[in-house]
Image (cartoon, helix red, strand yellow):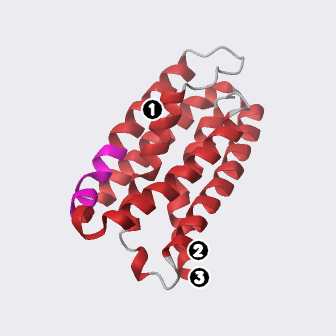
C-alpha cells in the first residue's frame, strides 16, 4: 500500500504545481473546484488507460509523453505570462473548458506511462487508481489555495511567475523524459 501511495503522491506533484501557478494570477474561485476534480479524474483515468494499454502501447506512450506535455505546458504558460503582463489589478477571468482540458491532459500524460507499472505495485490496480485520483485532487486543491493566498498578497502580476513555473515544469518534463 505504501508504494501505491508513493506513486500517487509522485504523480500528483505536476498537477499541484499547475494549480498553484493558475491561482497566482488571482483567478476566479470556481477553479478551486474545477481543477482539482478534473486533475484527479484525468490522473486516475490516464493511469488506468496506461494499465490497460500495458504491453501494446507502453513503448509508444513512454516515447512521446514528455514532448506532448512540454508543448501543452509551454503554450499555456506563455499565455499566462502574456495575460499577466497585460493584466489590470483585478482578478482574471476564469479559463475556458479547452484550457482546463489542456492542463488536465498535460499534467496526466505521465500517469499513462506510470499506469503501465501498476501490475508491479503490490496492491490491486483499482486501489492504486483510486489513490492516484484522490491524492491528486486533494493536493491540487491545497496547491490552488496556497497559490491564491500568495497571489492575493502580491497581486495578479504574479501570474507571470505562474506562467513561467508552467514553462519550467514543461522543460523539466522534457529533460527528464528524454
Circle 2 residues within 10 Å: few <14, some 14–19, many ≥20 = some
Where residue 76 is drawn, which disc sits there?
1
Sequence-earlier tag: 1 or 2: 2
Q: Are marks 2 and 3 in contact (CB under 8 Å)?
A: yes
Where residue 5 is drawn, which disc sits there?
2
* Secondary structure beneath label 2: helix
* Secondary structure beneath label 3: helix
Sequence-earlier tag: 3 or 1: 3
Name the residue nearer the viewer: 38 or 143.
38
Q: Position of residue 165 (x, y in %)?
A: 50, 42
Name the residue nearer the viewer: 152 or 136.
136
Q: Position of residue 92 (x, y in %)?
A: 65, 21
Residue 30 higher or lower than 63, as above or below: above
Q: Position of residue 160 (x, y in %)?
A: 54, 30
Q: Which residue is mark 3?
A: 2
Q: Is residue 103 left or right of residue 63?
A: right
Quarter of the image that includes the C terminus? bottom left
Amino acid at each position: 500500500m505504501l508504494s501505491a501511495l508513493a506513486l500517487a503522491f509522485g504523480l500528483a506533484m505536476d498537477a499541484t504545481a499547475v494549480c498553484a501557478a493558475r491561482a497566482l494570477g488571482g483567478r476566479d474561485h470556481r477553479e478551486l473546484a474545477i481543477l482539482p476534480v478534473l486533475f484527479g479524474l484525468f490522473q486516475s483515468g490516464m493511469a488506468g488507460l496506461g494499465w490497460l494499454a500495458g504491453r501494446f502501447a507502453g513503448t509508444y506512450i513512454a516515447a512521446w509523453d514528455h514532448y506532448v506535455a512540454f508543448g501543452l505546458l509551454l503554450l499555456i504558460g506563455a499565455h499566462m505570462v502574456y495575460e499577466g503582463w497585460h493584466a489590470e489589478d483585478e482578478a482574471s477571468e476564469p479559463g475556458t473548458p479547452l484550457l482546463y482540458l489542456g492542463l488536465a491532459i498535460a499534467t496526466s500524460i505521465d500517469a499513462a506511462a506510470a499506469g503501465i507499472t501498476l501490475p508491479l505495485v503490490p496492491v490491486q490496480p483499482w486501489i492504486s487508481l483510486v489513490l492516484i485520483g484522490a491524492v491528486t485532487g486533494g493536493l491540487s486543491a491545497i496547491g490552488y489555495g496556497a497559490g491564491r493566498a500568495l497571489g492575493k498578497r502580491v497581486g495578479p502580476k504574479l501570474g507571470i511567475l505562474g506562467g513561467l513555473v508552467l514553462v519550467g515544469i514543461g522543460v523539466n518534463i522534457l529533460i527528464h523524459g528524454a
